[in-house]
Amino acid sequence: MSKSGLFYLLVFSLLAPAILTSCSGTKNNNGKPMSIGSTAEVLVVLQNDEQWENQIGQTIRKYLAADVYGLPQSEPAFKLLHIKASNFTDLFQKQRNIIIVKINPKIKNPEVTVTHDKWAAPQLIFTVTAPSPVAFAKVFTAKKNYFTEKFIAFERQRILKVFGSSLDDKIMKAIKKNFSFTLNVPSGFYVAKTEPNFMWIRHEANRYSQGIMIISVPYKDTAQFSRDKILLQIQQFQLHNIPGPTTGSYMSLDRKFLLPKDTLITDFPTHYAVEIRGLWRVEHDFMGGPFVSYTFFDKNTSHLITLFGYVYYPNHKKRDLLLQVESILYSIKFNNLNSTIKK
């Protein structure tokens, strides 16, 4: 077993009694034990240690351990753990996100299968079978976005399920009253400011902050979906509504340290949305952090909606906190018709 796999096994051995007790006594509706694993953690099951060091492991790390765009420091999209199939016992089978690697020279074409809740729930398992490491690398590279998107979507669903037990009904009603939709906002957040076509929702913990801005403006033309137009609109609302900690300071967006990146996505609940990732900062102060925003056309109101989420956690990793905010934005539900990007 590799050093990483051995360490992982030793940690689980020490924690096994507590974990097994909680799992054996806690089951999902389908009777399966609760899955385990930290946020965005993926367990890779290999046939031998050499596979992690050769082209197979290199390919998996290249795409799943790549840095998340828009964070001020280096953080991988997923935390990767690996283990040999011979050590893949009942305890490890409770891992939430799993990739199983099978190299079989007897088959002709690579194959990718998806399994849900096989040993625990919720659980997502990809089994990649290929005739050689080269063939594995080729099929994994071709489907890299598919693997990434499915794992992230699965993590968002899990986070929202956790939040679902402690939603703030007062905030949700306030959103519904002011807009044509609602968001699943958990307890701990509060409405910091409400203006026509604008709402600012905050969560202030001891060491970090999370926030959400909702912006609604009349739709005029498709030019409003350009990255620069969206960023300019966000900054205008920040200038007038999000003050900083010192006199004359206010929230803004950074374009010097990291250029904001826009992407047209199709997995948002509105079907189409412009996603932008980048960094925010406070003018005339030293605060800053990552943000993610989603912009789409709301058919119910004929308005352009931007959902903006951000995190402030200086000198600490921010990936998981931003994923929590992202999950809240993905929980959007419309009162009547669905909305979309106006083509």
Image (spheres, helix red, strand yellow):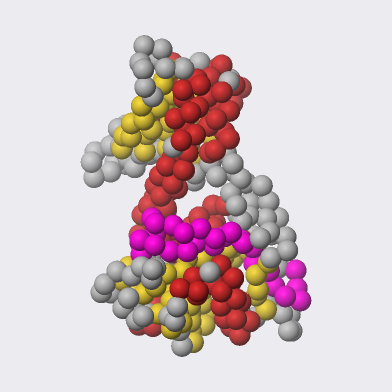
- Which quarter of the figure is the N terminus placed in? top right
Magenta segment range?
260-286
Q: Residue at x 70, y 55 (%)?
A: 315
**Tally of marks:** 0
Q: Residue at x 54, y 52 (%)?
A: 320
Q: Residue 184: percent from the left, percent from the top? A: 38, 66
Q: Residue at x 37, y 22 (%)?
A: 109
The residue nearer to you, when weighing 15 against 92, is 92
Which residue reaches farthest top? 106
The answer to whether residue 115 is left or right of residue 187 is left
Up the image or down, 10 lies above or below 176; here it is above
- Which quarter of the figure is the C terminus placed in? bottom left
User: Which image quadrant is residue 287 in?
Assistant: bottom right
Up the image or down, 38 lies above or below 295; here it is above
The answer to whether residue 269 is left or right of residue 15 is left
- Residue 198 inside the magenta-drawn segment: no
Q: Residue 158: percent from the left, percent from the top? A: 39, 50
User: Which image quadrant is residue 93 in?
Assistant: top left
- Residue 282 inside the magenta-drawn segment: yes
Q: Residue 98: percent from the left, percent from the top? A: 42, 33
Which residue reaches farthest bottom? 196
